[in-house]
């Protein structure tokens, strides 16, 4: 009886082990569901894409590809360094005017704005790409072609976006598409780096004309829908003291010592705070100061970047930085033996707001519906783009790609390939059209729910 029981138990364990091994070798079924828009938005897109005028625009995009390529190369080869976008802005304004916009102007900060009037004008929709690149003056921006690939700094980010919305305007003009809402085609300055979204912040400043929906075009492809803004705070923090000889002036405050303490206190506490919850990051990215190995520095500085899509989490980490800096300042001053106190200058050099446009918002649903129509799986994402600003202001906003395939953003060997780039134009056009509505009575509000 005991032997039989032992054999039975052994057999049971053996079968269990074999079963577990077989299960481990099997692929785990995916629990993710495909992202599909609500039926009413799918119906909107179906109504529009069945219209002859929309089909005509699609064909125009394909017929215009040689000209679109020429425009792309021409604009890429006009340098647009950070804070020096004026030359490109003037050319882009001329291109938008030639394309048929009702009015074109360059505002106080060098944003290019082209207005295409709608029938009712009761609503305003913005479609925008950014004029600036990350590359400094003197960078060689001559476009080189190898096979079907275009190479040049800024060829994709975001010159392709600028040309995409220019071509959408051209297509609408050639097909005589009249929208119900006013549409602003915008080339914005200051999206990159320390530009800190200054162009869009100015465009949407307090007291400016109301914007009802905002479509930023940045990046490539036709799947991404950025509806969550990745906020960031950036600081330049500098400790300053009298400086002096490393031996003769020993005992005076040392800015490097304070900087080291501040970094340690900040990163120690920030590490704890960011282990859980919404992904939040921090980086001590640049440091500097000092003159010689035998000199106590008179200055020590650092630049810090912190990011989160949660405003609360971002503010939490920001406060940890402020506390760490003041603690380090106090401690360094408390141990000095002679001379004046150490001082610190805390300067915010970047403030990108965070937030999100809900997935249920009509603009996001329409972008999903258009992507579904193109038979591509929508990718709902978070990123730091010009859409951050309208999102934070409560304006429905998204960022979508300009089509094609690209890579090497922010690098000298940046590239872009026109792999069915016209699909990107179709997508931008359809998202814009669903928001702005056709003035013929087939606007989104006219589609039965």
Image (spheres, rainbow, N blue to C red):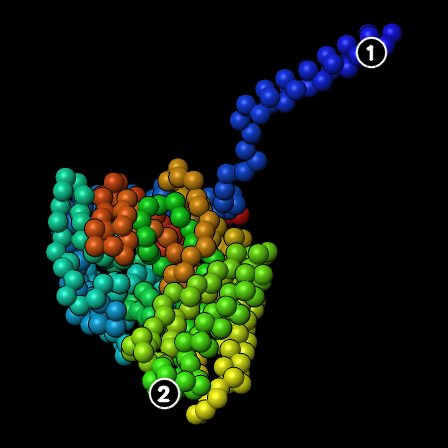
Give the SS element for disc 2.
loop
Give the residue displayed 31% in from the left and 75% down from the top: 293
Please give the residue where the numbered disc 1 appears in the rendered image. Answer: 5
Q: Position of residue 91 (x, y in %)?
A: 16, 66
Select label 2 or label 1 by which is in front. 2
Give the residue displayed 45% in from the left and 91% down from the top: 338
The answer to whether 377 is drawn above or below residue 365 in the figure is: above
Q: Tell which of 151 and 109 is nearer to you.
A: 151
Q: Quick check: marks 2 and 1 in contact, CB under 8 Å? A: no
Please give the residue where the numbered disc 2 appears in the rendered image. Answer: 248
Q: Determine the residue located farthest toward the front in the rendered image.
A: 247
On the rendered structure, is 208 left or right of 8?
A: left
Mark 2 neighbour density, 10 Å: few (under 14) some (14–19) many (20 or more): few
Give the residue displayed 14% in from the left and 39% down from the top: 147
Q: Earlier in the sequence, mark 2 or mark 1?
A: 1
On the rendered structure, is 282 left or right of 422?
A: right
The answer to whether 174 is drawn above or below residue 282 in the figure is: above
The answer to whether 252 is drawn above or below residue 55 in the figure is: below
Q: Position of residue 414 (x, y in %)?
A: 23, 51
Give the SS element for disc 1.
helix
Q: Which quadrant would the N terminus be assigned to in this image? A: top right
């Amino acid at each position: 009886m005991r032997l039989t029981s032992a054999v039975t138990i052994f057999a049971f364990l053996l079968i269990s082990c074999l079963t577990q091994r077989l299960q481990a070798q099997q692929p785990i079924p995916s629990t993710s569901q495909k992202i599909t828009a609500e039926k009413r938005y799918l119906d909107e897109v179906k109504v529009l894409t069945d219209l002859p005028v929309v089909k005509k625009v699609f064909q125009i995009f394909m017929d215009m590809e040689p000209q679109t390529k020429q425009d792309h190369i021409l604009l890429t080869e006009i340098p647009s360094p950070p804070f020096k976008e004026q030359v490109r802005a003037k050319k882009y304004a001329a291109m938008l005017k030639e394309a048929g916009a009702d009015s074109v102007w360059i505002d106080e900060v060098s944003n290019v704005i082209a207005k295409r009037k709608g029938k009712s004008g009761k609503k305003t929709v913005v479609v925008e790409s950014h004029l600036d690149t990350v590359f400094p003056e003197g960078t060689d921006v001559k476009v080189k072609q190898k096979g079907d690939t275009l190479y040049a700094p800024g060829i994709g980010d975001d010159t392709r976006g600028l040309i995409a919305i220019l071509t959408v305007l051209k297509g609408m003009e050639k097909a005589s598409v009249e929208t119900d809402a006013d549409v602003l085609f915008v080339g914005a300055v200051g999206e990159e780096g320390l530009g800190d979204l200054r162009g869009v912040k100015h465009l949407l400043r307090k007291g400016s004309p109301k914007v009802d929906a905002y479509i930023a075009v940045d990046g490539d492809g036709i799947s991404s829908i950025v509806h969550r803004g990745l906020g960031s705070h950036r600081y330049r923090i500098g400790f300053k003291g009298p400086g002096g000889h490393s031996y003769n002036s020993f005992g005076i405050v040392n800015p490097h010592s304070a900087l080291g303490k501040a970094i340690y206190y900040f990163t120690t506490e920030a590490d704890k705070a960011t282990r859980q919850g919404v992904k939040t990051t921090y980086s001590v990215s640049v440091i500097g100061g000092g003159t010689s190995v035998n000199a106590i520095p008179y200055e020590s500085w650092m630049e810090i970047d912190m990011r989160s899509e949660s405003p609360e989490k971002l503010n939490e980490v920001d406060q940890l930085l402020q506390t760490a800096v003041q603690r380090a300042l106090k401690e360094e001053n408390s141990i000095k033996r002679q001379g004046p106190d150490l001082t610190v200058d805390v300067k915010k050099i970047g403030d990108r707001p965070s937030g999100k446009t809900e997935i249920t918002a009509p603009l996001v649903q329409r972008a999903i519906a258009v992507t579904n129509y193109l038979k591509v799986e929508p990718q709902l994402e978070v990123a730091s783009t010009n859409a951050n600003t309208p999102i934070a202001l409560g304006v429905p906003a998204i960022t979508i790609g300009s089509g094609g395939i690209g890579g090497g953003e922010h690098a000298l060997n940046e590239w872009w390939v026109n792999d069915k780039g016209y699909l990107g134009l179709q997508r931008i056009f359809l998202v814009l059209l669903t928001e702005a509505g056709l003035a013929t009575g087939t606007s989104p509000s006219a589609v039965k729910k």
